[in-house]
Amino acid sequence: MAKVNGIIKIEGTVEDLTFYKKDGKNFVRKKGGISKERIMNDPNFVRTRENGSEFGHCGSSGKVLKLAVGTMVFKAKDSKLSSRLLQVMSRIKNFDTVSARGKRNVAAGFTTPEGKLQLKGFDFNPKAPFKGVLFAPYTLDTGTGEVLIPNFIPIEQVQYPQGATHMSFQSAAVLVDFETGLSASVYSPIENIPISLTNTSVTLTPTSVPTGTGVQLFLILISFYQEVNGAQYSLKNEEFNVLHVLEVV
């Protein structure tokens, strides 16, 4: 390791030298490490290859879930969603007690009750967790996908962001086959209501519930708006919106 004392401070790799900054100082070291070819072929790195295979699979499974949820995921997420989904999928994969090491997979993990519990309650936007926003009782019928919030008083039962005048609800019933990557999603109509003292019942019913091979997911999306001159605008690029996995079947 050597210090860089020149006027021009470089960060990155130039030929076989790597320039980097640590504790406010600039350093340079010779590029090294184990070659990819050795990792892929040396018997001593078999565990590394197994870990890499499962890691890649879990990353791909997170992408499959995001694609399955569809446009909802763009309305309520954070910049670390992919890494958080990777962690969840890795935990689910660990419940695969059948496959050999290096071939454990998310689809097999989801066949266990414990695997399903890892995704139930997942918030796509941790800045707006479902349990920290909605304080009203609700029911979910997994047969029809209907979500019912009875006798709902928004101004008393919602932690809404400053400036919000309206909110909307939408639910989704999603079928995901993590083995094939295929999915089907059905959404309920959007129900938009003012944030007021008016007692109302919110009913969200998808036109159908997808069935077949895979895992059934039931989600709810809560969005906030501010009304100005008769038009509604989302607040701060939708950073207050909620997208939550209610149930995994």
Image (cartoon, rainbow, N blue to C red):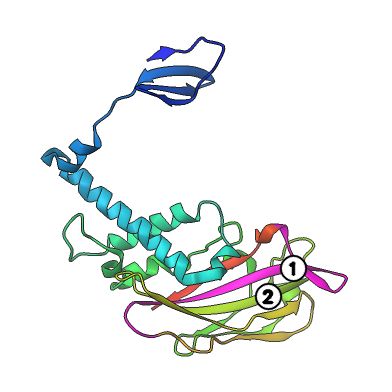
Q: Quadrant of the C terminus?
A: bottom left
Callout 1: SS: strand
The stretch in magenta equals 211-236
| Residue carrying label 1 | 225
Q: Amino acid at mark 1?
A: Tyr
Q: At which x and y percent is residue 25?
A: 51, 17
Please provide percent x and percent y for residue 178: 33, 69
Q: Are marks 1 and 2 in contact (CB under 8 Å)?
A: yes
Front-most of 226 and 196? Answer: 226
Determine the secondary structure under disc 2.
strand
Magenta stretch: dominant SS? strand
- In the picture of the structure, the residue carrying the numbered disc 2 is 168
Q: Position of residue 133 (x, y in %)?
A: 64, 66
Up-down: is 207 above or below 116?
below
Q: Position of residue 147 (x, y in %)?
A: 56, 84
The residue lying furthest to the front in this view is: 15
**In the drawing, does residue 24 fall left or right of residue 98?**
right
